[in-house]
Amino acid sequence: PLKPTPPLVVSPSSFPVDGEVTETDLSEELPLCCCRMETPCSGESLFQTEQTCMATERVDGLVSRCQRNVVKPEMMRPSNIVHLLVLCEDHRAGMVKHQCCPACGLFCRACKLYGSISHRFHSGCASVMKAQRFCPHSRFLFLVFSMRPKKVKYHTKQLYISAHHGELQKVIHLLVDGKDPNTLMDSQNKRTPLHAAAAGHQEVCHMLVQAEANLDVIDEEQRTPLMDACDNNHLDTVKYLLRAGAAVSCKDIKGSTCLHLAAKLGHYTIVDHLLSKTSKQVNCQDDGGWNHITWAIEYKHRELVLLLLSKGADVNIRDKEENIGLHWAALSGSDDIAQILLDARCELHAVNVHGDSPLHIAARENQLECVTLLLSRGTPLDCCIYNSKVWAALNTNKKLADVLSRYTAVPITCVNGVDCDSCPDNYKYVPDTCVTSPINIDKDITHLKHCGCTDDCSSNTCMCAQLSLRCWYNKEGLLPLEFCQKEPPVLFECNHACSCWRNRVVQNGYRARLQLYKTQRMGWGGRALQDIPQGTLISDRLSLLLSFLFTLDSKVGDVHCTDARLFGNIGRFINHLREPNLLAVRVFTMHQELRFPSSPASPFSQVIRLGERFDYGDHFWKVKSKYYSCQCCASTCRPSSATIAQSLERVASPSPAQLSSSHSAKTPPCHLCPPSLTLP
């Protein structure tokens, strides 16, 4: 039978390791007892299976099981080491009175209580410590006290080391131990634990900030923890430090901010997030006068340059030596970034304190692609390496000239890498269509149909849009993809009588970068120096207006045409291709005389790639085949001498009275000739 021993219950709080167990310790209730806890049945199946009490009693040395019916399904047990039991009401009451041994789980009703015993247990089930027996519950306390760690003292620098390695638990322990989170480490350039954690341990940063770490503390180089987070490209840590109140405008010993450091290393997401918080810092300069886009340009971070431009970065801001971004693009040889800067209206002819333009720097550094891009400005040959590719290009093209410098917003260079011929001078450049004989054209402004739109001329009530079937230009001034290319409609742009300005593209002039160059066998031609989106205006086909002469885009039977042999612009050099990349469109601007379009054949681009040209059509070769044919000798070339007969079969023989020399005697190239612009 269960026999009570002297009071064996110990205190749950301060278990004595040295000395005697006091009477107070033995009289306190142990919280490890489960006798009064009820556990819901885990499933109905167990309750249905066990309809009788599961209690086991030991009486007079015999063990027997209770056979009473169970009323409540909740299970009970005296401790966690005994299985859960479904009990009758009598044994449930005995369990509450601690009449069940917490070690073996047997009930005993025969023992008489005496002393201050609070729980019955067998003497063989008791726990022994220091020659005294205790309740079996106490074995858990023995385990707890045996696992109690010894107190260790850490050096102050351990907090920095743990923060550097991201050891969160150690950091918490050291902070609880009283270590100062703002301690400066002499061996680490006066850095603090927050500097170390900012390299990528956001949780450690949070604990240090909660312990009142200084967010804007600086090291010997005046760098803040936020700068270290930006330098290591850890976006989550940057976001946390900004939310906690870290300053973005702090500068290091070189005057660089967080944005300078991130832009230098090309951390796109960091720069984007910082600019979303402080857009006014986009043009902040360091001690050398460099802003963020300058760093991105020098290290060739193209996407970052585009991002900074979209945020308002100034491409013409100058550093201490008066260099702009284009100088640094030329120095690094980034012709793609240089093109982006030029499109953003970067000053092409900017000169630094040494008198160097971007072209001088590109030539001196032997950056051929940048030199090709910047050849619109002359440079002395001694700026580049002797006999290098750049030197050869400059030596061959030293007589570069802007053939349209007086009339165009975008300079057009003239390049001759074939012979010693100068730029073409057998024609007169004209900025508008001209006449040499009286032709009656109604330009009376009161006779013009016009609109009074206050929006973008996209409404159905716009008179100019009705004349053109619709307003074809989009916000970028491009023709849409659905624009009819086989039979393009006539375009009526807004004129001087209109009050709006969006529906004007030809009037504003072209923006594509073009070049006039000498071909190997086909004379002078025009080519693009950049990829041009579909629907872009390339040039307005201006020339001399004549009567009763052959025309490229007029239908047979018309009585007026244009001739660019003596008067014209860059459009007169556009060459031939059977599969063209340009489309000729008739456009009216300053008058609406249907016989005489203001721009009789304005070329709008399809997708322009290198090596594509223009197909002049069967009517052209019907006349010109009497004088010459294409000399590329390719079997696929339609206007070649081998295939010209097939073209003549599809077109009636021309009248001798209609033959006229309306173009240069040079042979137009086909699609296998050097790259150039081409029209249908």
Image: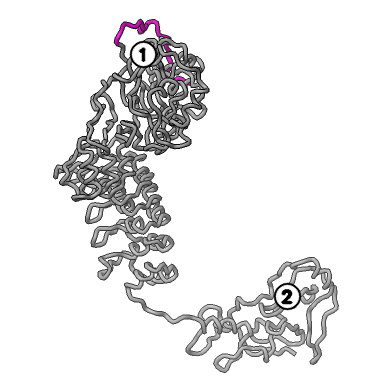
> Which residue is denoted by mark 1 in the rendering?
590
Q: How is the image coloured?
A: one colour
Q: CA distance from mark 1 to mark 2?
A: 100 Å
Query: In the rendered view, does 555 fall on the left or right side of 248?
Result: right
Q: Which mark is on residue 84?
A: 2
In terms of depth relative to the viewer, which is nearer, 433 or 428?
Answer: 428
The reply to whether the magenta stretch includes residue 446 is yes
Query: Looking at numbered disc 1 in the image, what kind of residue is underneath it?
Result: Met
Residue drawn at x 25%, y 69% is 186
Relative to 450, does residue 535 appear above or below in the rendering? Answer: below
Location of residue 450 (image quadrant): top left
**Picture coordinates of residue 615 (x, y %)?**
44, 28
- Residue 560 visible in image: yes
**Picture coordinates of residue 484 (x, y %)?**
51, 24
Relative to 131, does residue 444 appear above or below in the rendering? Answer: above
Location of residue 437 (image quadrant): top left
Relative to 521, does residue 304 appear above or below in the rendering? Answer: below
- Is disc 1 in contact with disc 2, using a CB cutoff of under 8 Å? no
Specify the segment rendered in magenta. Answer: 436-458
Query: In the rendered view, does 240 fall on the left or right side of 87?
Result: left
Query: Looking at numbered disc 2 in the image, what kind of residue is underneath it?
Result: Leu
Query: In the rendered view, does 594 fall on the left or right side of 37?
Result: left
Q: Residue furthest left?
A: 354
In terms of depth relative to the viewer, which is nearer, 21 or 587?
Answer: 587
